[in-house]
Image: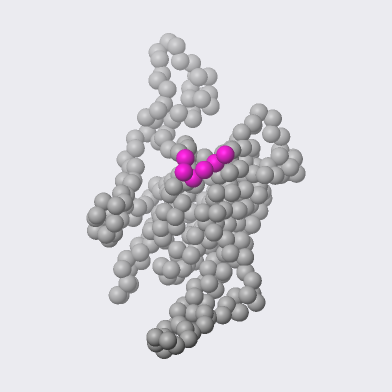
Amino acid sequence: MLTYALGFPPPDSEVRDWLLESKTKAEALTHAYAFLCAMFVVLLRYLKQIDDKLAAVGVSSVGAESLASKFRLLMTQGQTFFHQGPTRKRFYSAILQLASEVSSVILILGTVLNGLLLQMRSRPSTRTGSTPPSSPKLSSMDAMSPQVYDLKEELTKLMAFLIPGFSVMNTYPPALIISFDEAHALAKVEVKDKIPPWSKFYEFRRALQVIQSYPCFSVFLATTGKVNQFMPDPGDSSRVQQELMTLITPFCELGYDQLAEKVVSNKTTLDDVASLRVMASMSRPL
């Protein structure tokens, strides 16, 4: 989520900019919810058509039998050191377009519901024996007829496609991993007068908490961030203090080459060291 490419893979700039444009805590939560919801909808659409989409861009799926490997092939098609490929850009463009619609609907619903609450509070209380006031009308909502998306419902549809016979009551290994690279941009803590400190990462975590019972796992990676940006003060949450919830401590200070294959004298050759197998085991484990 860096502003420019300092490493590989290159950033998804449009996604970064959209997630960072929220100015308030409520807007950040709305953006996080809308982005996750839209991502599940678009991802399911792509996975159902994965073979056709690979064929459309001229990519062979020979040797890629799993959905994950096919999806990776599709997302890395046309990728360079400095730019993401057109297929990946179209994928995230579709997500952001839908996320903007979902976000707008959430704001509309919030405005209408607040108006209904004010309308109900402004009415006189019902006395014994009198006719109770009629329920407020949703004529404005009926006229607009927006499509309302539910985060759990959309994730359930995706999981039902990934896991035959899926039930949220059962336990499964992670079927979906959501990874945010260089996520320290989300972790900037906003401090303003009379408003408790908050960050877009905090609000993303709140949105993810809605789907905590599903077999998906989220990873926030950062190479230049600070630990306290991703590990809030336990005193900020009464549920953490009451031990109703626990916070996962960030994994940090991982050394290099912890999983690297050992070099054996008079046995390991230069070809071995230069092989993809050995090179993939080097650096920091993720």
- Residue ranking furthest to the front: 129
Q: Position of residue 26 (x, y in %)?
A: 43, 68
Is residue 44 shown in magenta?
no
Query: The C terminus is located in which quarter?
Result: top left
Q: Is residue 234 above or below residue 159?
A: below
Q: Is residue 96 left or right of residue 261?
A: right
Residue 283, by quadrant, is top left
- Whether residue 79 is visible to the viewer of this picture, yes or no, is no
159 and 47: which is toward the camera = 159
Q: Is residue 76 left or right of residue 275?
A: right
Q: Position of residue 214 (x, y in %)?
A: 47, 46
Q: Is residue 59 above or below residue 247?
A: above
Q: Position of residue 146 (x, y in %)?
A: 62, 69
Q: Which residues are magenta?
A: 165-170
Name the residue rendered at 59%, 38% in the picture. 164
Q: Is residue 3 left or right of residue 148?
A: left
Name the residue rendered at 51%, 54% in the picture. 152
Q: Position of residue 185 (x, y in %)?
A: 43, 57
219 and 106: which is toward the camera = 106
